Image (cartoon, rainbow, N blue to C red):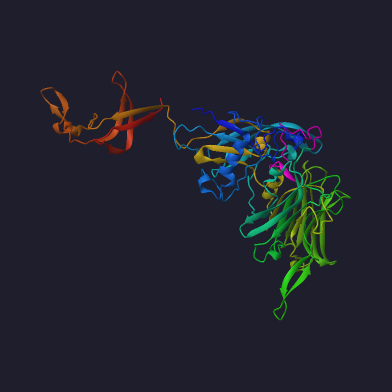
Amino acid sequence: MSVIYNIYKADYNPNQDWRNADPLNVSFDQLNKQFDWDDALTADEKFQRVVHRSIDHLYYRDFYSNNKASFGSGNINKQKRYLEDQAYVISLPQSKFGESILPGSVAVTMSFIGWYENTGSSGLFTTNWCIEDDSFGNLVVKSGYASPYNGALWSGATQLTASAVGEWPSPNVYKYIQAGKTSFTEDFNEGLWSMKTEYNNVYAGYLSTNNASLNGNLNGVLNLSDHLGAAWLFSRAASSSLVIKPGLVPDYMQSYNFENGDFTIAMVVIPQASTVDGSIIISKEGPVDQLLTDENGNPYTQTNYTKSPYRLSFKAVDNSVLFERDGGSLDKYTAVSASLVHYDAPSLVIVSKQQSTSTISIEVHSADGVINTNSATYNFSDQYCINPSYIYVGNSYDGKKGFDGYIDNIKFFKKILSQQDKDLLKATVGVGNLVVGNAFYNHGMMTLTSNASKFGNILNINSRGSHTIWETEISCTVSPGDFGMSSNPTLQQYNPDTNQYEYKPFVTGSHFKPYVTSIGLYDDYGRLLVIGKLNTPIQTPNNMDTTFIVRYDR
């Protein structure tokens, strides 16, 4: 049986031409709370902004704290839920009250017009995505072009096997588009890894394709440089920075030094032509007043800022990134660099330190498929490479080495990543998963967010309901005291006068209470059409009607 799905377009910002509009001179912008008559509508003339906020409230914003809003089953332990700036809201018509979507049955096909960058070639391509649910409420890309890297079809894992112990920037970056220079504070909590992050004078922007003819006019063209679609833009002139402050981790001053252990840091870097030499991308260094105790038990403070367990900076002379591990003196210092290949193009940078081999390494995966790698051996103990400082992104601790460009999808791992994890980070340009939406099974609803809703067109949707839908349904009502016919031979006896079997006298009495086990449906000619078998024999009451529903397919 074919089902017509209801599909709504939900926009955080329903102004379709907002990229080219003056935010101070349009009917609606990101920070405008007032509705206007010309706000974008859904197919049934509901405001797209109302649909977005309703879904965000019920299924995302209050999903963890508001039990009443947590409709449907979902894997809240394995996958965080974010509703991004645009979303398809897909509703399954429910023919029966309480009917839901069967987990593992969802398949959505979408078409895209995309832009790819390969070595020696580039251009538009048309592709389809096959999106399926993982039975835990996550809609994931199972096949199709998950990334413009090499123009290759995606295959492999759909989510990182390694757990991040820190992840930036804010997943709500899209809410600050058109807000101009922005400063705010947010918290990150992941098990024992808890910290506070200060965003100072940063700008939210959408990543654009390298094709100049498409810049500023991406409507209808898929740009897979970032599944989130938006990223933080840093400006040296504005003294932009992120300051990450570990605060609740036991012995937090040591935790993000990753002392005596492996670690990996991955991020997307897009430098601009104005980026100067020595600009800080990310570092853990700077003066911090440590509270110590002397031999007499008296507290005192000591400033510590000379060592840096990691520092990633930009080298303008050859357009490369430099990773340094500083032990505090000239003979305790290791550096390794790799080229970014392009300005104004996304490069995935993966830096790591491996304890067992005493090596630090760097990998740069460029937007056209080029991979540059380098490694070096360090000859000093980790105990000489610690710093209780905060972590700085996009600038140095003193604000004198600001970076110009985008820094996005920063992830810390307390281990060396597998090749599978690196491939997935590369395919998603740092996002680390192919989750593009959620299925809320019990409520018969799905959402597709991010680039899937920005640039894709839904071609086909398939799913199964949790209740079987029958072609024909017949209601059979038995009045109180009625006795239906029965083929049970023990209820009958032979009458020689009539030469036929008749029901015994006790069967026709008012005290006879038979159990119903089967129901037969006959046509006007007395021909048996359907036999319905009950799972459990049922005795009909004598004070009310009893209705049996027989469902069948022809």
Asked where in the image residue 426 lies, by quadrant, the reply is: top right
Q: Is residue 530 magenta?
A: no
Q: Position of residue 553 (x, y in %)?
A: 41, 27
Please determine whether, in this image, residue 267 is positioned above or below residue 525: below
Asked where in the image residue 213 lies, by quadrant, the reply is: top right
Q: Position of residue 173 (x, y in %)?
A: 70, 45
Q: Is residue 220 magenta?
A: yes
Disc count in the image?
A: 0
Q: Residue at x 38, y 30 (%)?
A: 551
Asked where in the image residue 153 lies, by quadrant, the reply is: top right
Q: Residue at x 56, y 43 (%)?
A: 58
Please determine whether, in this image, residue 199 is positioned above or below residue 180: below
Q: Nearer the viewer, residue 423 or 86?
A: 86
Q: Position of residue 283 (x, y in %)?
A: 77, 58
Task: Report the side of 318 relative to 160 (left or right).
Answer: right
Determine the residue located farthest toward the right in the rendered image: 317
Q: Tell me the chief SS of the magenta region.
A: loop
Q: Nearer the viewer, residue 325 or 450?
A: 450
Q: Residue at x 24, y 29 (%)?
A: 484
Q: Nearer the viewer, residue 338 or 86?
A: 86
Q: Is residue 260 visible?
A: no
Q: Is residue 502 visible?
A: yes
Q: Residue at x 56, y 38 (%)?
A: 446
Determine the residue located farthest toward the top in the rendered image: 525
Task: Report the side of 275 relative to 136 (left or right).
Answer: right
| Quadrant where the image shows the C terminus | top left
Give, as a single range, the part of the protein colored magenta. 210-232
Determine the residue located farthest toward the left in the rendered image: 497
